[in-house]
């Protein structure tokens, strides 16, 4: 189906589309690796997937992790994360990371 760029500028390819529902499968391309969709994304709320080492998470086939910006800003804090080389270094994860705004957590935590 070919290369497309979404409205946010993230390049990707649509690899399949259902003719009835128009559901699509694709691949986003990021500097840290390709992300096939749809995808299961483990949550590392405070920069870690609880109970698993980063190498174990990767060996299970994980392509991307989700982190919560609000929780990270509260502890350990953005200054410490920057001082330790950024979020990828801090998490010991070289693959893609999606961070949410944490807005819901900020309101209800």
Image: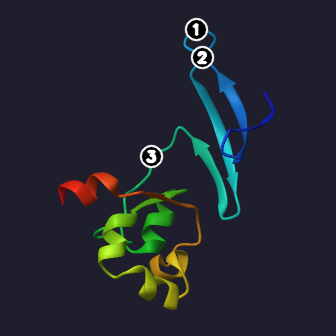
Binning the other alpha carbons within 10 Å of mark 1 as few (below 14), some (14 to 19) or many (20 upward) gives few
Q: In this rendering, is residue 83 above or below 33?
A: below
Residue at the top extreme of this rendering: 20
Residue at 71% x, 31% y: name it.
Answer: 15
Task: Please say whether residue 45 is visible from this viewpoint.
Answer: no
Question: Which is nearer the N-term, disc 2 or disc 3?
Answer: 2
Residue 106 vertical placement versus 39 (above, below): below
- Can you see residue 48? yes
Residue corresponding to mark 2: 22
**87 and 1: which one is in front?**
87
In screen coordinates, is 11 left or right of 106? Answer: right
**Location of the N terminus (image quadrant):** top right
Q: CA distance from mark 2 to mark 1?
A: 6 Å
Residue 93 in the figure: left or right of residue 75: right
Query: Which residue lies most toward the left here?
Result: 109
Instruction: Find residue 21 and report its horizontal and vertical position in percent.
Output: 54, 13
Q: Which mark is residue 20?
A: 1
Q: Quadrant of the C terminus?
A: bottom left
CB-based contact (under 8 Å), mark 2 and mark 1? yes
Kindly indicate the quadrant of the structure image that contains residue 26. top right
Label of residue 40 in the image: 3
* Residue situated in front as seen by the camera: 77 or 91: 77
Q: Position of residue 9 (x, y in %)?
A: 71, 47
Label 2 secondary element = loop
Q: Are marks 2 and 3 in contact (CB under 8 Å)?
A: no
Seen from this angle, which residue lies furthest bottom?
Answer: 83
């Amino acid at each position: 189906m070919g290369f497309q760029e979404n409205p946010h500028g993230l390049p990707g390819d649509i690899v399949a589309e259902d003719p009835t529902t128009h559901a699509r499968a694709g691949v986003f391309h990021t500097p840290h690796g390709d992300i096939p969709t749809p995808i299961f994304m483990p949550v590392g709320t405070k920069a870690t997937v609880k109970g698993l080492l980063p190498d174990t998470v990767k060996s299970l086939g994980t392509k991307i992790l989700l982190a919560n910006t609000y929780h990270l800003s509260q502890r350990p804090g953005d200054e410490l994360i920057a001082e330790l080389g950024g979020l990828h270094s801090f998490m010991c994860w070289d693959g893609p990371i999606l961070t949410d705004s944490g807005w819901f957590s900020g309101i209800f935590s």
